[in-house]
């Protein structure tokens, strides 16, 4: 079937490019997220379903998380003239996700990475809470480029739109 083949090529390309983006530029994504990327295609007589699944936090990694911001109380406890307090650089500004004002992040999520780098998990958690998480678009960019390669007949027959198909396919 033409639809089945086109959607399977789309899914394979999406998984391959998303995995490549997770590991490029020396960034290490969690192995759990990497392995969880998969797709499923189910074609019927007059309809089809395409599902792309990944770990729950994959959307946060893709779209980033806006930091809470704030001011550091001190930049150096040894030089009093350097204690002016500096604004945190906020990452993920365009993201629909954000950290709450009253909350914070549990340091347990950063323990292994912080120990590997010789840092305090509490300091790392506080920094991530204030700064946020950068947008990676490891999934969004490959989705848009693979969507452009879908046959025009398929797009017209099912009247598919990029944004609607993206929302429809994420599980």
Image (cartoon, grey):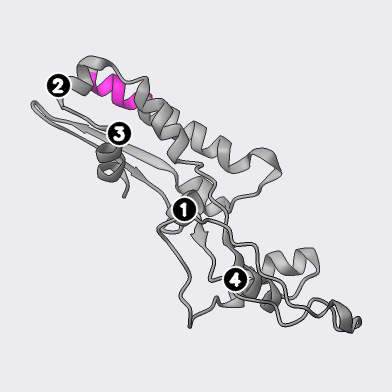
* Image point (63%, 73%), residue name: 125
Residue 4 inside the magenta-drawn segment: yes
Nearest to N terminus: mark 4 or mark 3: 4
Which residue is identified by label 3? Answer: 162
Comparing marks 4 and 3, which lies closer to the viewer?
4
Report helix, strand or loop for mark 2: helix
| Marks 1 and 4, how far apart at CA | 16 Å
Nearest to N terminus: mark 2 or mark 1: 1
Tell me: residue 5, above or below residue 29: above
| Marks 3 and 1, how far apart at CA | 19 Å
Badge number at residue 64: none
Tell me residue 151's x, y (percent). Answer: 28, 16
Comparing marks 2 and 4, which lies closer to the viewer?
4
Nearest to N terminus: mark 2 or mark 4: 4
Report helix, strand or loop for mark 3: helix
Which residue is identified by label 4? Answer: 130
Contact between labelled residues 4 and 2, with CB atoms less than 8 Å apart: no
Looking at the rendering, the stretch of residues picked out in magenta corresponds to 3-9
Tell me: residue 46, above or below residue 166: above
Q: In which quarter of the image is residue 147?
A: top left
Report helix, strand or loop for mark 4: helix
Instruction: In the displayed orientation, state which residue is furthest to the left.
Output: 46
* Image point (72%, 68%), residue name: 114
Observer able to see residue 110: yes
Residue 134 inside the magenta-drawn segment: no
């Amino acid at each position: 079937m033409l639809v089945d083949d086109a959607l399977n090529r789309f899914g394979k390309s999406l998984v391959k490019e998303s995995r490549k983006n997770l590991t490029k530029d020396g960034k290490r994504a969690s192995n759990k997220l990497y392995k969880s990327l998969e797709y499923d295609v189910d074609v019927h007589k007059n309809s089809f379903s395409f599902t792309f699944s990944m770990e729950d936090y994959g959307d946060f990694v893709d779209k980033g998380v806006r930091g809470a911001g704030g001011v550091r109380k001190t930049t150096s406890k040894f030089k009093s003239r350097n204690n002016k307090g500096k604004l945190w650089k906020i990452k993920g500004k365009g993201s629909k996700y954000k950290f709450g004002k009253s909350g914070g992040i549990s340091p347990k999520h950063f323990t292994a990475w912080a120990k590997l780098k010789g840092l305090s998990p509490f300091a790392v958690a506080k920094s991530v809470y204030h700064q946020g998480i950068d947008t990676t678009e490891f999934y969004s960019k490959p989705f848009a480029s693979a969507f452009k390669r879908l046959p025009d007949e398929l797009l017209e027959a099912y009247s598919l739109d990029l944004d609607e198909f993206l929302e429809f396919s994420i599980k």
